[in-house]
Image (spheres, helix red, strand yellow):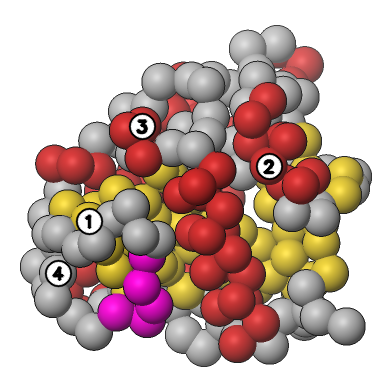
Amino acid sequence: MSRPDLEGRDASPLHLARVRFSDPMAPPTTTAHAGMPQARLRRVQWSTDLGTVRRLFEGYRQWIADHRDPAPSSQPRVESGLAEVDRLLRELPGAYGPPRGEVLLWFDGDEVVACGALRELAPGIGEIKRVYVRPDFRGKTFGHPFVRALMDRARELGYEVLRADTLPSMTAAIEFYRELGFRPVPAYWPHPVAGALFFERRIVG
């Protein structure tokens, strides 16, 4: 999950507090924690949310490009990784749409405080992507239930294994994944950022 993300330390170009979705009153999929009495979690509605999701994902792509490995020897991997991100952007909802994908949005009132996505990597294997938590909502009391909601949705979609990636600098995110039972695995895509870490957890059985 190498991005300005869950409990990360780096600054992010995404300011979700400024984003207003066109259908903020859609039925929630679950209720948030007690510290956010107006909070609700809902699935993306592509007919109205596509433009906003695209802008959020484009911000992620820019952040990745700004932090990519500058070494000349790494350019083939960098370009391959960015090309994969660009392809997913062009094809939205694509891999993040039904029947095997999902995007979850967490609101506090009518403001987005977090987003996260799921996509299929292989039969039975899903991946957590594009997770972002607004800085003033970061922390385990918020991050844990949000990622658990993604894990629950992944089970509903029929996934048995979930994967994720992050950066060495995201020490809190690394600790977070480990606490949730994710274990390190070899790289499964050509990440553009040097030293990216990859994790996996079995979520059924």
C-alpha gap between disc 1 and disc 2: 23 Å
Residue drawn where x is 73% and y is 65% of the image = 162
Q: Position of residue 52 (x, y in %)?
A: 21, 57
Q: Which residue is mark 1?
A: 108
C-alpha gap between disc 3 and disc 1: 14 Å
Mark 2 neighbour class, 10 Å CA radius: few under 14, some 14 to 19, many 20 or more? some
Q: Quadrant of the N terminus?
A: top right
**Amino acid type at mark 1:** Asp
C-alpha gap between disc 3 and disc 4: 21 Å
Q: Position of residue 28 (x, y in %)?
A: 29, 79
Q: Which SS class for mark 1?
A: strand
Mark 1 or mark 2: name the one nearer the start of the chain: 1
**Amino acid type at mark 3:** Pro
Residue drawn where x is 32% and y is 28% of the image = 13
Q: Which mark is residue 188?
A: none
Mark 2 or mark 4: name the one nearer the start of the chain: 4
Residue 30 belongs to magenta span:
yes
The residue mark sitting in front, 1 or 4, is 1
**Residue furthest to the front:** 34
First to last magenta residue range = 28-32
Q: Which SS class for mark 2?
A: helix
Q: Which residue is mark 2?
A: 176
Residue 64 belongs to magenta span:
no
Q: Which residue is mark 3?
A: 135
Q: Which mark is residue 24?
A: 4
Q: Does residue 143 appear anywhere in the picture? A: yes
Mark 2 or mark 3: name the one nearer the start of the chain: 3
**Amino acid type at mark 2:** Phe
Mark 1 or mark 4: name the one nearer the start of the chain: 4
Q: Does residue 53 appear anywhere in the picture? A: no
Mark 3 or mark 1: name the one nearer the start of the chain: 1
